Image (spheres, rainbow, N blue to C red):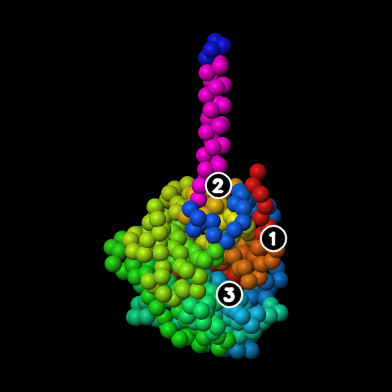
Amino acid sequence: MPDDARARRQTGAGLGILLALVCAAVLLTALPDHDREGGGTCAARTLKSWSADAGLTGEFARYGDDATRADDWTGGDGTHSVRLPDGRVLWLFSDTYLGQVHGPPNPVGESYAWRDASAPLVRNSAVVMSTQGRLLSTLRAPVFPDPAPQQWRWPVAARVEPRSPGSSEQVLRVLLWTRTTGQSPWIYGVPTSTEVATLSLPGLRLEGITTILDQSAVADPSRRVLFGTSTVDAGDWTYVFGGDDGQAASRPASQAYVARVPRGRLGEPAAWEYWDGAQWAVRGRPAPVLGDGRRTGVGSAFTVVRDGGTYVLFTMAVGTAGLTTITSYWACAPTGPWQRPTRSFSPSLPQGQVAAYNPQAHPALSDGDRLVLSYDVNWLDATGAAAQANLSRNVSLYRPRFVTLRLGSAP
């Protein structure tokens, strides 16, 4: 190669590296002030280690297998949690089996505990955990009644807030997803609206439900956005993350969105602002902050935590790996840009044709650099008669499992 050509190539490479460093610096420093609220230095974060949390997983197995009551929780998914002011933890679930658990062995001779095929299935439930970490009781289910025939409510994130701005009385706000029965491929229902329920404290009595964002007028169900899969406080704001059902059968190929609300005002629709791709807007179409539908994306249920000044998002991986593998993204602001995953992990699954989904962080049980994360487990075909039979035959297939994660600096 001639010397002048070699020199041009080396100079070009040097300029490319310099430009990359400048761009990286811009990403880390040129953020809007409202996204920097809460302090902390933003730095690349990645998963350093993880381990199964047998104690917490076992506590849900113990409670679910307890046959002393006929109207309590024996299994569910959509696992979310919130710590109450008196120290208790309230666990919220979507579709839930009630009733009793029998065995083992089960009727076909397997060494699994089982539930009768006629066990009641409700659309949502809530279970109370003591300050010592022992599950105590199931609230009367469903906690959130169906809004109309062929519609139901799934609870997602929840927060303790003042009853009204400046009030000393506290209430519990629970974000809800309303879904409507639909035809294939909408086997898990058609996204309909985001709502916020208010529960009294300490009694946990449902006081009312307010519609926040009605999506029924959006003609294409795959473009309807439901908010509340995760919330993060930063400065004066609560950031509320949501997703669409870009792929109705729910392998992660959906897009992530974000809204914000002044802290303490989740139940006020007029206080919500949505990121439209350029600014926060009270009205208008929310714009995705993560997901291209192919190489990057989220499940419709994912979770976000704040580690110092860095936002870390956990979701099932894109494509077929999303049936078994949890991955993460990081960003310096809730609006992004979200950086590609640096490390993924595959938590343990029971034998059979099962899948993991809905990873959720539980700050109420996390401390220091220890982050507790749950994931739900279900039969791959969760809608057929055979799947329902498998869930009844082996109750462990429809209960949350837990892992402990530790984050660190990305290389």
Q: Say which residue appears at 47% left-offset and 85% top-offset.
A: 206
Say what amino acid the circle numbered 3 marks.
Val
Q: Earlier in the sequence, mark 2 or mark 1?
A: 2
In three-dimensional space, the C-alpha distance between marks 3 and 2, rounded to whole angstroms, equals: 31 Å
Location of residue 46 with respect to 402 vertically, above or below: above
Q: Quadrant of the N terminus?
A: top right
Residue corresponding to mark 2: 28
Which is closer to the viewer, label 3 or label 2? 2
Q: Say which residue appears at 60% left-offset and 52% top-offset.
A: 42
Q: Is residue 228 left or right of residue 278?
A: right
Location of residue 97 with respect to 69 vertically, above or below: above
Secondary structure, mark 1, is loop
Q: How many marks?
A: 3
Say what amino acid the circle numbered 2 marks.
Leu
Range covered by the magenta-colored residues: 6-31
Q: Say which residue appears at 50% left-offset and 50% top-offset.
A: 31
